[in-house]
Amino acid sequence: MTLFEAASEVVFLNRGFVLSSLISEVVLLIAIVAVTKVYLVPAIRYYKRGLLYTKQGCSPPRHWLWGHLTVFPLSHDGMLKRLRTTAQYAGMFVSWAGPFTYWIETQHPTTCAVLANSSVLSAPKAEFLYGCLRPWIGDGLLTSKGSKWKRNRRLLTPAFHFEILKPYLNIFNKSSYAMLEKWKRHSGQSYDVYGDVSNLTLDTMMQCAMSTDTDSGGEDGGYGYINAVHELTLLVMERVYNPLHMIDWIYHFSSNGRRFRKLVDFVHETSETIIKERKKELETLVQEDNDNASTATNNEISSFKKRGTKHLDFLDILLQTKDENGNGLTLKEIRDEVDTFLFEGHDTTASGIAWCLYNLAKHPEYQQRCREEVLEEVGEKEKIEWEDLSKLTYLAMCIKESLRLNPPVFCVGRELNEDLTFNDKYTPCKKMKVESGNTVLMQIMSMHRNPHVWENPEVYDPERFSAENMKNRHSMSFLAFSAGPRNCIGRNFAMNELRVVIGQTLRQYKLWCDDDTPQPKMQPNIILRSANGIHIKFKPVETEIT
Ligand code: HEM
């Protein structure tokens, strides 16, 4: 190689080096700009707003950097610690979770009413909480917003008409009998009822919603589905408590994220299989009807009759419903609603029943009064029937009091789509203007245990719900089923199921708790559960408790 050739090779290599380092610098610059824009700028904006909101005197003392993280750690305990804020911050307070995230938390009927009376309750739900549910329950009624939510709420409301709900009582009665039969084996022992009650409510939900029982709930049966749902709720709450996992791609690669996806796939497969089978069955029946000219007018309804289903179920309605333009729901939309109902309809009710049985076991005097009422109104009949429900008034009071102390849905959240002003005579700041875009939580359990709203709030006292005592109470002081346009669509379904299952249990068993019975430790885990199960003791009614 000549000197000239060697020199030109060096220049060429250098040029290549300069070019590649230029490219890597540009890439680095783009990455820095992207990270700054996507994460840093919003984080700084958020930090400044958090600093401002917590300065207004509406929040417990906080650290300038990690806010209230030491006061309310991001954990189940941190959630429970909020209950203690009601003594000083009876109306509302701002909670600042570390430098970047803060929420406004309302916990009094007057502050919650500001949310309920605005259009906010129909506003988008707090994304940091409900967004974590979305990969699982999709854009169903619980998580959707705007016109989609409005359309689907209208389409689904007929599914909760009392004529539709009536036949479901047979299912509640039958499932209660099956569960109570099993309990004979555990008579006199301290027994964790949560699992059985959860199986019961999923089983009834599958039958009422899809005329399917848990045996067809996937490869390993309904129990696999229940465990999957249970684990999914734990994973969602763990995600909410971990700010790093709020960033999608970090969560995606974490072990929790991978497990979450696996469970979601299993749950989706289960519901899709059921929907597809039903769709096929329905199409075959409609085809048969079409072949029969005399029934061609009302094919679908006559198909239900032919199928022999004793009740029109939720899936029947979803598969057939059409909006004013004649458009039905897509397979994905149906799956989202089915997953929403299977989650929201079984886990909440299981929590409500299990906590109520526990509260009645702790209070034999109220329990006995309920039992006498059931025996008197239902008599010797095997089933608790539709006509009996309205007569079980004391039982209903006991259920509501339990939902007050242990509300299955303990908190709901919204992203404000308008500025709101909260007047709060209890807290030092007195008045707080919250701008659109902020997240406001309605802390249902804190409100239900707020000493400024309920006298001796920690005491279980069903008389609070007597007609007389209810008269003078603020309409927003009991929010177990929320309020306003986005209240619980399944409220009547749930109250019916609670009355039948608890009524049947009291007819057959005396419940109690003693020193050997572990005290449940409340665990706010999307749904209010207990970290150590819900244990009670029971014996057939005719035997004496020693
Ligand atoms: C004791 C049992 C139950 C309790 C305490 C309960 C409580 C609630 C609460 C507080 C909300 C409002 C959630 C929010 O605003 O984010 C809600 C919404 C909802 N509930 Fe329930 N629920 C129960 C049972 C049921 C049942 C049995 C079903 C279905 C059969 C159901 C279906 C729904 C749906 C679909 C929504 C969303 C409604 C909408 O946004 O339009 N719930 N429930």
Image (tube, rainbow, N blue to C red):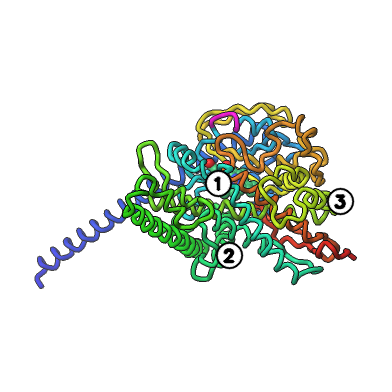
- The mark closer to the camera, 3 or 2, is 3
- Res. 227 mark: 2
Residue type at mark 2 is Asn
**Residue at image mark 1:** 164
User: In front: 66, or 410?
Assistant: 410
**Counting residues from the N terminus, which is met first, the one under dot 3 or under dot 1?**
1
Residue 97 visible in the snapshot: no
Q: How far apart in space, not on screen, are marks 3 and 2 (Cα)?
A: 35 Å
- The mark closer to the camera, 3 or 1, is 1
Residue 331 visible in the snapshot: yes
Q: Which residue is located at x 65 percent, y 37 percent? A: 106
Q: Which residue is located at x 50 percent, y 63 percent? A: 263
Q: Secondary structure at mark 1?
A: helix
- Residue 328 is situated, as x and y percent measured from the top left of the image, at 38, 45
- Could you tell me which quadrant the C terminus lies in? bottom right
User: In front: 265, or 350?
Assistant: 350
**Counting residues from the N terminus, which is met first, the one under dot 1 or under dot 2?**
1
Q: Secondary structure at mark 3?
A: helix
Callout 1 environment at 10 Å: few (<14), some (14 to 19), or many (20+)? some
Q: Main secondary structure of the magenta part?
A: helix
- The mark closer to the camera, 1 or 2, is 1
Q: Secondary structure at mark 2?
A: helix
Residue type at mark 3 is Glu
**Counting residues from the N terminus, which is met first, the one under dot 3 or under dot 2?**
2
What residue occupies the far right of the structure in this picture?
Answer: 546
- Position of 510 relative to 151 (above/below): below
- Position of 241 relative to 254 (above/below): above
What residue occupies the far front of the structure in this picture?
Answer: 294
**Residue at image mark 3:** 365
Q: Which residues are magenta?
A: 115-119
Residue type at mark 1 is Ile
